[in-house]
């Protein structure tokens, strides 16, 4: 699997078995995965028509995917690998349904909220008894080894990214999920160099690399990954009006002083980032038609503002209009569209 040159813009692909004749679905599903993610030998468990869909994002060296499917086996045997090498390490994040992962050393049962890391050029068989959803991230093996260092875990490695996972583990899964969600929801309608939320696509990849190092690498954490984990912890807990730097630092696993330093080196303070995040979430909520019946003060409260006056004052300082003025302006723009 060859990495894309840095100057090439990332691609995104979509696939669904909907509309494909049942007898042709497995072959088409295999073909899409071979082009877009990993070559796989796929078999169904019974005679029911297989259903599957996938959204793919190709970054300069990494690939991300959001996968849905009904019961099936997916395999990369030794002979299959010799004919279809990939040169990548894959991380599979289980989000719905249970799966069994067979490898040379035994087998592992995976439940939602768990991720497994494996060398895609070592034999494996994955079994899904019922419908499932998962996220997938692949990274060139050489890049992976450089990131995790000599003390990287023996593969397969498993980590939690659900409620019991660390901030870094949750942030890695969330980064993959959010990157793909923007494509699935049609925003942006086409991919360009601006990436997600105005962030260059190369930054998305660097962020993922930093998080992989923090989750799977040696004791020296990546500051890029720490900032990403802290930012995503803030996003998840933004409704907490008492969200403090000490709690954020504890979640990421560093001291409050170290957290303040790495935020400062990136050109911002922790407090300013938290406030701007609250304002960004509130601004988006105010422009969402589904929330027209929610009062301005209630929206401020939902995103952690201690009082309506604090919400109104900081919103106006940031956006040069009050929350109510912004709501009316966004409604006017929606009506014109």
Image: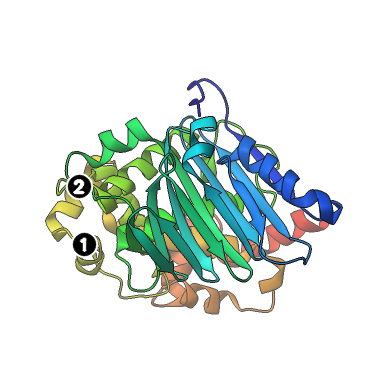
Residue with the mark numbered 2: 221
Specify whether residue 275 is in view.
no
Q: Residue at x 57, y 32 (%)?
A: 10
Q: Position of residue 257 (x, y in %)?
A: 12, 55
Q: Position of residue 90 (x, y in %)?
A: 43, 46
Q: Position of residue 218 (x, y in %)?
A: 17, 46
Q: Give me the C-alpha separation between circle 1 and circle 2.
A: 13 Å
Specify whether residue 60 is in view.
yes
Residue with the mark numbered 1: 249
**On the image, which quarter does residue 210 sit in?**
top left
**On the image, which quarter does residue 56 sit in?**
top right
Mark 1 is surrounded, within 10 Å at the Cα level, by few (under 14), some (14 to 19) or many (20 or more) other residues, namely many
Q: Earlier in the sequence, mark 1 or mark 2?
A: 2
Q: Residue at x 54, y 31 (%)?
A: 83
Q: Is residue 303 above or below residue 335?
A: below
Q: Position of residue 169 (x, y in %)?
A: 34, 59
């Amino acid at each position: 699997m060859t990495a894309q040159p840095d100057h090439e813009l990332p691609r995104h692909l979509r696939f669904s078995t909907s509309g494909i004749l049942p007898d042709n679905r497995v072959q088409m599903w295999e073909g899409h995965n071979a082009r877009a993610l990993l070559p796989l030998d796929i078999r169904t468990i019974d005679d029911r028509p297989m259903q599957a869909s996938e959204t793919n994002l190709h970054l300069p060296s990494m690939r991300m995917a959001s996968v849905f499917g009904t019961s099936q086996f997916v395999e990369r045997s030794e002979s299959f690998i010799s004919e279809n090498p990939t040169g990548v390490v894959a991380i599979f994040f289980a989000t719905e349904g249970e799966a069994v992962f067979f490898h040379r050393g035994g087998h592992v049962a995976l439940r939602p909220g768990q991720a497994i890391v494996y060398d895609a050029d070592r034999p494996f068989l994955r079994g899904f008894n019922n419908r499932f959803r998962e996220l997938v991230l692949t990274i060139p093996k050489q890049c992976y080894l450089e990131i995790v260092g000599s003390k990287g875990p023996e593969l397969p490695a498993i980590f939690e990214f659900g409620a019991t996972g660390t901030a870094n583990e949750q942030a890695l899964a969330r980064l993959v999920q959010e990157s793909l969600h923007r494509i699935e929801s049609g925003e942006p309608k086409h991919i360009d160099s601006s990436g997600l939320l105005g962030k260059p696509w190369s930054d998305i990849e660097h962020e993922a690399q930093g998080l992989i190092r923090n989750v799977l690498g040696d004791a020296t954490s990546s500051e890029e990954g720490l900032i990403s984990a802290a930012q995503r912890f803030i996003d998840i807990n933004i409704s907490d009006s008492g969200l403090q730097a000490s709690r954020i630092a504890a979640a990421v696993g560093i001291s409050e002083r170290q957290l303040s330093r790495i935020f400062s080196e990136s050109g911002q303070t922790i407090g300013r980032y938290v406030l701007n995040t609250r304002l960004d979430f509130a601004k988006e909520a105010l422009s969402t038609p589904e929330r027209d019946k929610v009062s301005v003060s209630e929206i401020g409260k939902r995103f952690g503002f201690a009082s309506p006056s604090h919400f109104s004052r900081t919103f106006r300082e940031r956006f040069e209009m009050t929350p109510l003025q912004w709501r009316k302006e966004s409604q006017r723009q929606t009506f014109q569209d």
